[in-house]
Image (tube, rainbow, N blue to C red):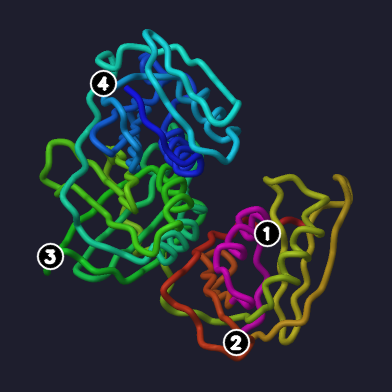
Amino acid sequence: MKFTVDQHALADAVSWVSKSLPSRPINPALHGIVIEVEKNKVHLSASNQEKSSKADFSADVTETGKVLVSGHLLNEISRSLPNKPVTVQLDGARVLVTAGSAKFTLPTTDAETYPTLPEIPEITGVIASDVFAKAVLQVATAASKDESLQKYTGVFVQIKNDTITLTATDKYRLAICEIQWEATHPNTELTALLRARTLEDAAKSLTTSKTVSIYLTPNTAKEHLAGFVIDGKSLTSRMLNDSYPEYSKVIPTEFTSTAIIEVAPLLDSVRRVALVTDKTIPLRLAFSPNRLELEAGSADGKGIGEEGLNIVLQGEPITIAFNPEFLMEGLHAVGTAFVKISFTTATKAAVLTGIPTADGKEIDNYKYILMPTLLPRK
C-alpha cells in the first residue's frame, strides 16, 4: 500500500472520521482508522458502534492495500505535518508517513479484525446545510444530558413531504423547529429519534458544503439508521430505539400577554442577576408596561441581585420565574436581535420566538417553550 496526497486533503479526511473514534472502546480494533487504498482513491473509516464516519479522497496511488492504524495518532500527525505532499506507505507491519523532512512510523493492526460497518440507507432528501445546521443547534439545546432518560437525550425528526420538524425536550423546556427540504420521493412520511449529541456533531461538521443529503431507513426496517453525506464524507448513526412522548399539548396557543425585548441586554442582565444564585435557584421576572424587573437570590443566601430593563409589553402584567440557565440557552437559541416572550399564567409554559428588529415580523418556524418554576419567596 502506497499513496501520495495533499496534506490538507489528508488532514481534513482524517479529522472527519476521527469524530467517530470512541474514548473507551470495548473492541480494541475501534481505536483505529481503516485506510483502504484503491485505484486513484483512498477510503478512511472509523466507528464507535453508535455512529460511523467515512471519507474518500483522490490520491496518486502507487500500490493498493488495506490497513488499520491508531486513529488518534494519525489525526495528530496529519494535522501537524508541513504543507507538502504526504506519502503514506505500508512497510512490513508498519506504516510510514512522510512529508518533506518529517517522517513518522505507525504500528498497524490486521484490518480484517475491524467490524463490518453498516451500509448507508437509501437517500431520503436534500437540504441546505446551513439551514439544517442552524435548526439542529437551535433544537438540540433543549435535549436532556441525562443518559438514564434515553428518549429525552434525542432529537425527534418528523418528515412529511417537503417539511422536516425537529423537536427536543428534557421535560423542563421544549424546542421545535420546522424547515423546508427537497424530498426524494413525493408523499414521504418518516420519523426518527437520533441522539442530540450525534446530530449536533454532524450539523457542525456539515457546513463545509452547500447541501447535505439525508438518508433514513423506513420505520418498518429491522435496523434503524440515519445517514448524512456531503462531498465524499458520510456519517451513519443508529437511531434511538424508543418512542417519543406526545408533546403538542404542552405548546400554548393562546396568550394573555407578550413582551418584546432586545436579546443582548436581556442576556447580560440575566447573567449578572443570576450571579447570586446557583443553577437550581429560579430567577424572578416581573413584567409591567414598558418595564421588566429581574430579581434573584435571597437575604439569607449569597445575596440578592436586581436589575431593570425597558421593554414593550402588550396585555396583562405578569410575574413569573424561570431557571436562569434554561432562559439564557433559549435566548441564545432564537438567534435574533429581539425576542418575543408570550405568556398565559405564571404557572404555565411561556413561548420564546425570534424577531429580527423591534418592529419586525415574528419568525415562527422556531419556538422555545419554557416551563416556569415556583416563584421564590421575597
Please tell me which residue lies in front, 87 or 123.
87
Q: Which numbered circle lies on residue 185? A: 3
Q: Which residue is mark 1?
A: 375
Left or right, residue 155 beside residue 255: left
Mark 4 or 3: in front is: 4
- Queried whether the magenta region covers residue 332, the answer comes back as yes
Specify the segment rendered in magenta. Answer: 314-339
Amino acid type, residue under disc 4 in the picture:
Pro
Amino acid type, residue under disc 2 in the picture:
Gly
Q: Earlier in the sequence, mark 1 or mark 4?
A: 4
Disc 1 on helix, strand or loop?
Answer: loop
Left or right, residue 128 beside residue 75: left
Q: Which percent across, then down, holds residue 248?
A: 34, 64
Q: Which percent across, then down, holds residue 329?
A: 60, 57
Is residue 88 placed above or below 142 in the rendered structure?
above
Q: Earlier in the sequence, mark 2 or mark 4?
A: 4
Disc 3 on helix, strand or loop?
Answer: loop
Please tell me which residue lies in front, 141 or 56.
56
Disc 2 on helix, strand or loop?
Answer: strand
Amino acid type, residue under disc 1 in the picture:
Leu
Mark 2 or 3: in front is: 3
Q: Which percent across, then down, holds residue 112?
A: 25, 15
Q: Quadrant of residue 90?
A: top left
Q: Earlier in the sequence, mark 3 or mark 1?
A: 3
Q: Which residue is mark 2?
A: 315
Q: Quadrant of residue 82?
A: top right
Q: Earlier in the sequence, mark 2 or mark 3?
A: 3
- Queried whether the magenta region covers residue 303, the answer comes back as no
